[in-house]
């Protein structure tokens, strides 16, 4: 670990525009610093700036929820309102990391979690995300946990988290404050695709602070988080699916799907979701939307299986969300 | 205190035991499910592990690694790194190791890190005032390489075929041709890593020419010899302390980089030096279990009686390493069949050193043989349990030697009954919603060993006793069982016996490995205690066999005398030594078991959910039902990992260990481990040792993975022949 300067912010405004890297729970940043993958000269500790409330939100009736950026993952997952109205979020949180990590990790910090690409984690490897312009050793390397959607020749890394996948399906919004004021970015647009600048994970600009994440009122749909991984806990998703689906009178009236573990960001495809509307919940309808979502999917060797796995996991999640007995996903 | 009066009792296992001391003692603590005496220290953090005991002035060393897989280090920016903050030294000593020592080597492993054999090989030690400074400086080391093209993987590489490791009996090809049913299948198992909870660490300090190393090691007498040889000093000047070891699984059998590096650095700097390996270094620079490719051929008649058994294995290791995963170790004697082929082939690769890992051989060989047996059972239309029972040989079919004891049939029958095997349905016949349900089973077999081991027991004048041996407790329960053995033999309550382990200045034990630790070190302790019994009997004027010791008193000839009175102020010392002898050669010794698994497999995603695992074992006298059961639960969890989650991933270009942390190398998590039941059959094996106890910990991971794989087939109809059964192996064949 390199020596660094440390400053503690007392208020959000201390953190906004501050010169240095913000550190909240530190569950990812400290690991990366020990390995010298991240080498900030200065850390700004935001653990004492407040922003740790979960409160009703929304115009008029307040059916939405405003989650302070410093709310810990464990507290968010256990919140009664979240468990009742957005169980998808609670389940996604509990599907990630370990109890100890969730006790430290924060809502804002979790959105900033960096990829688990092993070549990103290896200072001896070529990695455009860690060291722009050096190339991508994952392309012809071991890429089991890499992207099948939205990747580029510069980077095939995935965003590894679970919380943001649920938030994307729930149409949550990130509230960001910078020197120029406050802006609101949908969670689904917060992470970037790698393109030729994979070193930038998100649209957050230097000096900006995530203040909160807001959830719109629950849709009344049935919410499911299905995470497929190489062991049953403490493993990153091979593929995860967040689904919020409403069925009325034998037909789907609304569906929102998000995929994790398949791209540089939680993957949403509202046009594909719309294919479900008006259809009876059955295997054929689920397969059709899965095929639409995965139309442009491409594997890189080790991760080729993720394409059929994503298709099957989508079908399984939709079957569970709609209470449909699907016998086969072949 | 008066000088102890010593009696030695040294015993070689040339004949089966006829005394059976532990069945005629009276204290009643042997076999009891007692807590570990050191348990409270461990769970309250007061048990000091290697890197938790720093003498004053200790500084920190971190190993710098090679980032190429093959070649030579021809230069290094040592001057630049020496000038970094806090840096005390950059050491490129030719005595630094290339590889850790193999188990029981007792001499230095391959040294001189200037020649590079694998990515991650240590090339220098950087020592600094703080761990952070040392880590930072180690990352700043930039070797200049003269690199060569590495052999990144074993695929397609030429192999060595050591003549001594091949065997042929009869004509397997003819047996295959003539067979009513035959199986000819190839399986693969991936490289695996021990992943012990405590990373390797050593703290070295010198007092003149005498070196003390606090380390995390399994076999101190061998480790002293290895370390002394590596440093070029006399073994008598080396003391190793490994009082507590946070897991070993074979990964700490021999000395490793940290001990040698710490010793060299401490000598140069004149200060104690701690070298605690980073988890990544543990993964990439200590040991791995070799990947294997295994071809199994089985031929049977219409009744399922085996006429041929072929098991050929391909493994890998570094150039120059003599160890190679003994995949087929149990195959020669597990099942009958007059026509047999055993094959063993080794490829030389530029990857992390391959060495012993829990049940080397059987851990990967038995599951594959058991999968093949399941395939044969299906082909022959015979129940898998029945097929195995029909093929249990009456003697070792490869040598004609009798078994010391063969309890496989008992285990199979008892296990099947306890598990509810009769409820198993034919392949693909059971479904619960999305989930396909299946049951599978496998035999568990592991060779049984005894190693030379010495111990001293001292009975003090106050009627308390102390056990001393350099045995280690790697989490297995050595403290508990050795205390129990001495307490049982001397008729003392547990709290009157103290066991001191993990100090190489104490009498040399077998060390922990090969599941021989309890039997070997335990026998030495029992013999030492028996020597004290003999002294007590003399004092009471009776034969040792007529003596009953219980609760601190001696009963002989209808008279009870407190031990303190018998001792009359004297201190009695017993020295016990056990050596393997003729019973190692005259009979085939093994431990036996049967494992049963129930799984659910998602018909949609291919996810495997292990629902329950049940095992029945016969492994001689159980010394402590609780620690023995814990050993088995751990072994079975190990087996779950090899069936479902664990795999070392190597980069195809340079062979480097890609998933080198605990987040990406997937040992099973709690949720992967379901309800497990363990049953021990009452058992004694007089050929094994004077306690008639046998190995346990490794047996439990032999077979587990086979039972799980066979259950997956029963659920889905899919044979996964490449371990582990991750979703990608099932997806394209799901119904």
Image: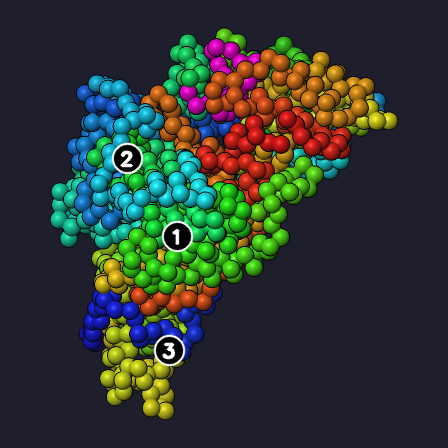
Q: Which mark is residue B335?
A: 1
Vertical side of B254 occupied by B395: above or below: below
Front position among marks 3 and 2: 2
Residue at label 3? B24
Kind of element beneath mark 3: loop
Kind of element beneath mark 1: loop
Tell if the residue under mark 2 belongs to the same chain as the one under mark 1: yes
Kind of element beneath mark 2: strand
Q: Residues within 10 Å of mark 2 (few under 14, many from 20)?
A: many
Q: Residue furthest front?
A: B178
Residue at label 2? B346
Q: Residue furthest bottom?
A: B558
Q: Is residue B74 left or right of residue A147?
A: left
Residue B353 visible in the shown view: no
Magenta residues?
A141-160
Residue A232: horizontal and vertical position, in percent? 56, 38
Q: Is residue A143 magenta?
A: yes
Q: Is residue B613 magenta?
A: no
Q: Earlier in the sequence, mark 1 or mark 3?
A: 3
Q: Earlier in the sequence, mark 2 or mark 1?
A: 1
Task: Using the image, name the chain to which the residue with label 2 belongs.
Answer: B
Tell if the residue under mark 1 belongs to the same chain as the one under mark 3: yes
């Amino acid at each position: 670990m390199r020596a660094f300067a440390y400053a503690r912010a007392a208020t959000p405004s201390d953190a906004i525009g501050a010169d240095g890297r913000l550190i909240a729970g530190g569950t990812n940043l400290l690991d990366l610093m020990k390995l010298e993958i991240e080498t900030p000269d200065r850390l700004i500790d935001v653990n004492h700036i407040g922003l740790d409330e979960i409160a009703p939100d929304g115009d008029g009736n307040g059916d939405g929820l405003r989650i302070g950026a410093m709310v810990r993952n464990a507290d968010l997952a256990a919140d009664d309102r979240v468990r009742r109205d957005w169980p998808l979020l609670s389940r996604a949180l509990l599907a990630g990391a370990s109890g100890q990590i969730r006790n430290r990790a924060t809502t804002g910090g979790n959105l900033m979690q960096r990829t688990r690409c092993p070549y990103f984690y290896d200072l001896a490897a070529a990695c455009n995300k860690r060291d722009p312009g050096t190339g991508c050793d994952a392309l012809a390397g071991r890429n089991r946990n890499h992207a099948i959607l939205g990747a580029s020749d510069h980077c095939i890394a995935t965003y590894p988290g679970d919380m943001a996948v649920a938030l994307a399906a729930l149409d949550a919004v990130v509230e960001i404050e910078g020197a120029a004021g406050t802006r609101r970015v949908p969670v689904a647009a917060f992470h970037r695709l790698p393109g030729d600048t994979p070193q930038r994970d998100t649209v957050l600009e230097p000096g900006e602070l995530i203040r909160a994440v807001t959830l719109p009122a629950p849709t009344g749909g049935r919410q499911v988080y299905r995470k497929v991984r190489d062991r049953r806990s403490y493993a990153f998703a091979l593929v995860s699916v967040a689904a919020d689906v409403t069925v009325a009178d034998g037909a789907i009236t609304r569906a929102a799907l998000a995929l994790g573990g398949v791209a540089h960001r939680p993957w949403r495809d509202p046009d594909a979701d719309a294919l479900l509307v008006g259809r009876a919940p059955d295997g054929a309808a689920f397969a059709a939307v899965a095929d639409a979502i995965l139309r442009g999917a491409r594997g890189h060797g080790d991760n080729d299986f993720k394409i059929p796995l994503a298709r099957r996991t989508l079908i399984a999640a939709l079957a569970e969300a709609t209470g449909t007995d699907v016998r086969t996903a072949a | 205190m008066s000088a102890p009066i010593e009696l030695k009792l040294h015993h070689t296992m040339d004949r089966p035991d006829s005394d059976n001391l532990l069945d005629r003692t009276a204290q009643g603590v042997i076999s009891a499910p007692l807590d570990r005496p050191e348990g409270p220290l461990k769970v309250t953090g007061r048990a000091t592990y290697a890197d938790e005991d720093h003498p004053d002035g200790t500084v920190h060393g971190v190993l710098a690694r090679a980032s190429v897989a093959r070649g030579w280090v021809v230069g290094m920016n040592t001057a630049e790194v020496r000038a970094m903050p806090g840096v005390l030294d950059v050491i490129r000593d030719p005595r630094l190791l290339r590889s850790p020592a193999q188990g029981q080597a007792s001499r230095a492993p391959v040294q001189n890190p200037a020649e590079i054999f694998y990515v991650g090989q240590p090339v220098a030690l950087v020592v600094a005032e703080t761990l952070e400074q040392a880590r930072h400086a180690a990352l700043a080391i930039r070797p200049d390489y003269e690199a060569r093209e590495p052999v990144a993987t074993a695929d397609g590489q030429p192999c060595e075929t050591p003549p001594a490791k091949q065997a042929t009996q009869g004509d397997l090809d003819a047996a295959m041709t003539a067979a009513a049913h035959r199986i000819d299948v190839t399986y693969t198992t991936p490289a695996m890593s021990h992943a012990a909870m405590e990373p390797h660490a050593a703290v070295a300090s010198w007092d003149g020419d005498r070196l003390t190393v606090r380390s995390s090691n399994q076999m101190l007498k061998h480790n002293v010899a290895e370390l002394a040889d590596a440093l070029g000093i006399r073994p008598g000047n080396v003391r190793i302390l490994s009082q507590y070891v946070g897991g070993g699984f074979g990964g700490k059998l021999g000395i490793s980089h940290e001990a040698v590096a710490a010793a060299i650095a401490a000598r140069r700097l004149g200060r104690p030096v701690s070298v605690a390996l980073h988890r990544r270094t543990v993964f990439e620079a200590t040991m791995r279990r070799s990947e294997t490719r295994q071809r199994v051929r089985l031929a049977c008649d219409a009744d399922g009686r085996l006429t041929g058994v072929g098991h050929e294995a391909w493994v890998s290791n570094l150039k120059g390493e003599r160890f190679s995963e003994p995949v087929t170790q149990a195959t020669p004697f597990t099942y009958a069949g007059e026509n047999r082929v055993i094959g063993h082939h080794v490829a030389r690769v530029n990857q992390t050193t391959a060495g012993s890992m829990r049940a080397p051989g059987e851990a990967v060989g038995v599951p594959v043989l058991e999968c093949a047996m399941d395939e044969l059972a299906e082909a022959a239309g015979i129940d898998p349990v029945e097929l195995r029972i029909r093929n249990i040989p009456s003697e070792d079919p490869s040598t004609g030697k009798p078994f010391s004891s063969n309890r496989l049939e008992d285990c199979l029958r008892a296990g099947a009954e306890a598990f509810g095997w009769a409820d198993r349905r034919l392949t693909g016949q059971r479904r619960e919603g999305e989930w396909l349900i299946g049951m599978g089973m496998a035999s568990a077999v592991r060779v049984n060993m005894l190693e030379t081991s010495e111990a001293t027991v001292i009975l003090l004048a106050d009627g308390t006793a102390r056990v001393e041996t350099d045995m280690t407790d790697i989490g297995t329960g050595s403290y508990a069982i050795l205390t129990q053995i001495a307490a049982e033999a001397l008729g003392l309550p547990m709290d009157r016996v103290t066991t001191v382990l993990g100090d190489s200045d104490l009498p040399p034990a077998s060390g922990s490995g090969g599941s021989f630790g309890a039997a070997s070190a335990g026998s030495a302790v029992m013999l030492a205690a028996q020597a004290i019994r003999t002294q007590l009997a003399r004092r009471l004027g009776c034969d040792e066999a007529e003596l009953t010791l219980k609760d601190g008193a001696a009963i002989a000839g209808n008279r009870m005398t407190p031990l303190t009175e018998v001792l009359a102020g004297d201190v009695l010392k017993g020295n016990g030594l056990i050596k393997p002898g003729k019973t190692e050669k005259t009979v085939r010794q093994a431990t036996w078991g049967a494992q049963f698994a129930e799984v659910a497999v998602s018909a949609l995603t291919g996810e495997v959910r292990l629902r329950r695992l049940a095992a029945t074992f016969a492994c001689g006298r159980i010394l402590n039902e609780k620690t023995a059961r814990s050993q088995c639960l751990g072994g079975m969890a190990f087996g779950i990992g090899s069936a479902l989650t664990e795999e070392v991933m190597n980069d195809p270009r340079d062979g480097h260990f890609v998933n080198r942390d605990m987040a990406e190398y997937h040992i099973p998590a709690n949720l992967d481990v379901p309800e497990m039941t363990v049953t021990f059959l009452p058992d004694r094996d007089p050929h094994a040792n004077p306690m008639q106890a046998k190995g346990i910990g490794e047996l439990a991971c032999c077979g587990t993975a086979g039972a799980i794989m066979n259950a997956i087939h029963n659920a889905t109809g899919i044979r996964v022949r490449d371990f582990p059964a991750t979703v990608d192996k099932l997806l394209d064949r799901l119904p």
